[in-house]
Amino acid sequence: MLQFREVKMPVLKDNGVLIKVIATSAHIGDTRIRRVDPFLVRIIFGLFKPKKNLILGLEISGIVEKVGRNVTLFKPGDEVFALTGFGLGGYAEYICLPEKVKEGKQERKGQIVIKPRNLTYEEAATVPAGALTALKNLQKAKLSRGQKILINGASGSLGTFAIQLAKYYGAEVTAVCSAKNFDLVKFLGADHAIDYTSEDFTRIPQKFDVVYDAVMKSRASRCRKILKKNGVFLNNSRQPKIIGDDLPFLKGLIEKDILKPVIDRTYSINDIVEAHRYVDKGHKKGNVAVTVYSV
Ligand SMILES: NC(=O)c1ccc[n+]([C@@H]2O[C@H](COP(=O)([O-])OP(=O)(O)OC[C@H]3O[C@@H](n4cnc5c(N)ncnc54)[C@H](OP(=O)(O)O)[C@@H]3O)[C@@H](O)[C@H]2O)c1
């Protein structure tokens, strides 16, 4: 259940960065933790139910308010975006995150990066979790120029990031979504589109180097027929290992106008319950942003 509470200001450590949160997202991961989805919550957030007073929020954007005495990379006034890691905490007015974390611990401890200059706070807040997951999956498949990829759930958060990243890697993209989202996926670069409501993509004659079931509605065994020999099936069942260079790399693509988050709706934090209800329906286009503080 989501409830507003007064909580203590986070304590700033010597290596910590205190950020005034301007925006966050209603991320599918937040809604799953709220619902105590067993796969995510039991493994990552403790047995059977989330910690008492767990503040959700996997990703944020905001302004650095104060820095700890050992911090050199950020200063008050810096505009940043961040993955909050397993500590979550984005649905609050302030969050404290470490300036830098040990390599390979980014998905656990979070990561702060200067915000892409060409995105609003709301746009920037929807990038870290979805774009990093899509990026790591495509990297796992070693997607390369001229290869063919099919993306199932192409109109969702992961799908919309994956289309743009696959085009960046030079692949030919077939997007699976409902017909109402054809214009969106083609605008993002998809070469072909299949309507899952009228056609079973696992029975088409074409073969692919990579099938990415971004929406987790299919199975490897069902997709085997449309994979080339040595083709790769991907979904999001494994937590990807994020490294320190990943989020700065995505920021670079954003600033070169190669990657842009799709924002379906923006809610105020006061309407967070409505935002979660909308995400729970499972039909958002791209991402849902949440304004925590209006600037
Ligand atoms: N987003 C992340 O960062 C992240 C990270 C790790 C794991 N995951 C997991 O990955 C999955 C997808 O996450 P997401 O955030 O991308 O979801 P999402 O944004 O909520 O996906 C919604 C989209 O999926 C489409 N869709 C719904 N049912 C479909 C179907 N049967 N076939 C094809 N498309 C369908 C919808 O299109 P229509 O309206 O046309 O139906 C809608 O555009 C979830 O299981 C999530 O838990 C997500």
Image (cartoon, helix red, strand yellow):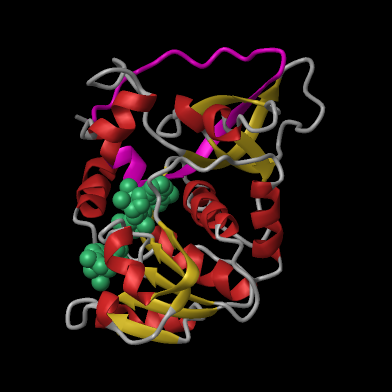
Percent position (x, y) of residue 124? Answer: 55, 53
Q: Quarter of the image holding residue 90?
A: top left
Residue at 33% in and 38% down: 30
Instruction: Looking at the picture, tell me which residue is in the foreground, 112 or 249.
Output: 249
Q: Position of residue 277 (x, y in %)?
A: 19, 48
* Labels in figure, total: 0
Q: Is residue 73 above or below residue 252?
A: above
- Quarter of the view holding residue 83: top right
Q: Residue furthest right?
A: 72
Q: Is residue 20 magenta?
A: yes
- Magenta highlight on residue 157: no
Res 266 seen here: no
Vertical side of 111 occupied by 222: above or below: below
Is 238 situated left or right of 75 in this image?
left
Report the side of 49 relative to 68 (left or right): left
Position of residue 55 measured from the top left corner of the image (x, y, whole percent):
37, 26
Kindly identify the residue that appears in the image at 22 percent across and 21 percent down.
Answer: 48
* Residues rendered magenta in the picture: 2-31
Ligand 1's quadrant is bottom left
Q: Residue at x 23, y 57 (%)?
A: 282
